[in-house]
Each structure stands twice: as structure tokens, then as C-alpha cells.
Image: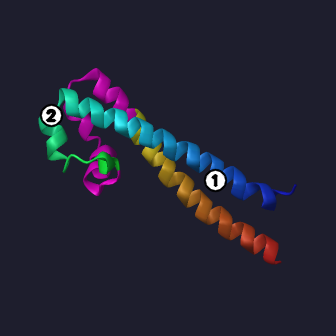
Amino acid sequence: MSLVEIWPLTYLAILAITVIAYVYHGFLLMGHLEVRHRSLWMALGSPVPTKIFVFKFLGWIIRGGYKQTQDRELLALGRKTRYLLFACVIFVVIGQLGGRTLVKLTAG
């Protein structure tokens, strides 16, 4: 198999694992906020299960809003969730650039 055949499958596998890890840690973070920091949880938007995809929550994670509390567990979960969110964005950008490069390479 050549790189052109392997690249899309490898990219999709890594992206899927990263997104699944973000969703898992995002739900853990939301559960922790709901139980221990109810006012902060309500300030992030409506209490729906898909809150981890709402722009308000994504911005809160990127800005590091979890650092305003002195809860060590929240800091650890927030840090992991933030890194995974950045990894998802990076993999999407790499996939777009890599896909275009492969198209150019195969076209001639």
C-alpha cells in the first residue's frame, strides 16, 4: 500500500480517537461542574447533554475558564479537555492540508 492509500484511513482513525476522547473528557468535566460547581455549570448555558459542543463552552475551555476555581480535579479535567480540543482542531487542519497535498501529488 502506498502513502496515498494509507493516509486517509490513518487520519480518520486518529481523528476519531481524538474526538471520542474529547467527548468522554468533556462529559466528565460537565458532570463535575454539575455536581460541584452548579452556578458555573448553569452560567455556561442550558443544561443539555450536547453542551460540550456549544460555542460558549468551547470558548470557556480554550480561555482556560476552569482555572478560576481552586478545585484540583476540575483543573486536571479541564486541562485534559483543553488539550484534546486543541488536538481535534490541529488534526482537522492537518487533514485539510494533507488531503490537498495528496491530491496535488497524485494529480501529477
User: Given the image, on which type of amino acid does mark 2 rest?
Assistant: Arg
Does the magenta-highlighted stretch encompass residue 76? yes
The residue at the point 31 percent across, 23 percent down is 73
Residue 78 visible in the shown view: no
Magenta range: 53-79
| For residue 93, side relative to residue 23 (left or right) | right
Above or below — where is 106 with respect to 31? below
- Seen from the viewer's position, the closer of residues 33 and 89 is 33
Question: For the residue carrying disc 1, how many other residues have a C-alpha within 10 Å: few (<14), some (14-19), or many (20+)?
Answer: some
Q: State the image quarter where residue 78 is shown.
A: top left
Task: Single out the residue that lies furthest toward the right.
Answer: 1
Task: Single out the residue that lies furthest toward the bottom.
Answer: 108
Q: State the image quarter where residue 95 is shown.
A: bottom right
| For residue 22, side relative to residue 65 (left or right) | right
Q: Tell me the residue that label 1 is attached to.
A: 12
Q: CA distance from mark 1 to mark 2?
A: 36 Å
Label 2 residue SS? helix
The location of residue 18, given as percent across then percent down, is 53, 44
Question: For the residue carrying disc 2, how many other residues have a C-alpha within 10 Å: few (<14), some (14-19), or many (20+)?
Answer: few
The residue at the point 66 percent across, 70 percent down is 100
Magenta stretch, main secondary structure, is helix
User: Given the image, on which type of amino acid does mark 1 rest?
Assistant: Leu
